[in-house]
Amino acid sequence: MTVRRLKTYAGAQGYVYQYYFVGKRAALADDSEAPATEFVFDVTSDRKLTYAVSVFLPQAAVAAWAAAHRRPLNEAEQYAAAKLRLFRAFDEIEDMKAHSRRLTIDSALLEEALASLGVE
């Protein structure tokens, strides 16, 4: 049995979300986001219904960041970018369950997220 660490985030829309990281995998080949890494989080805002939210980190964005910074992103930095994208959605989207269960990190968002953490 896997014990998951439930975390809490208070979004700007007034919802308090609880979430945990489920895992990551390569996006399916026929997915519109492929080639990408898919980070999967289970999320709830009411403690009754839990739903999956996928954050896609396209290989093109990772490659562009690596070229600009002359080094590859490590796994922890990729996870941090995915988590910050999830937080941004919590802050900006009123009804995550209905409207945003698939999130993408483009090159500009990746740069912004990692810069906010001081990653160069």
Image (cartoon, helix red, strand yellow):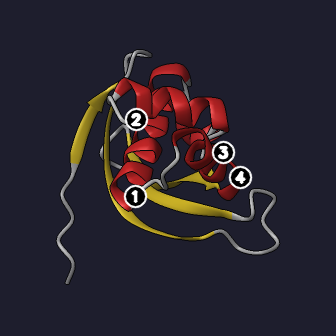
Seen at 30% across and 45% down, the residue is: 47
Question: Mark 2 packing: few (<14 Cα in 10 Å), some, or many (20+)?
Answer: few
Label 4 near label 2: C-beta < 8 Å? no
Which structural element holds mark 2? loop
Q: Amino acid at mark 3?
A: Ala
Q: Amino acid at mark 4?
A: Ala
Label 4 belongs to which residue? Answer: 60
Q: Which residue is mark 3?
A: 64
Seen from the viewer's position, the closer of residues 66 and 96 is 66
Instruction: Residue 4 in the image: state x and y as whole percent.
Output: 21, 65
Q: Nearer the viewer, residue 77 or 44?
A: 77
Badge 1: few (under 14), some or many (20 or more) residues near its Cα, within 10 Å?
A: few
Q: Which residue occupies 48% across, 51% down?
A: 71
Residue under label 2: 120
| Residue assigned mark 1 | 74
Residue 51, how many percent across, how many down?
Answer: 48, 54
Helix, strand or loop at mark 3: helix
- The span from disc 4 to disc 1 (Cα, nearest Å) is 15 Å
What crowding class fits label 3: few (fewer than 14 Cα within 10 Å), some (14-19), or many (20 or more)? Answer: some
Mark 3 vs mark 4: in front: 3
State the residue lying farthest toward the front.
70
* 3D distance between C-alphas at marks 2 and 3: 13 Å
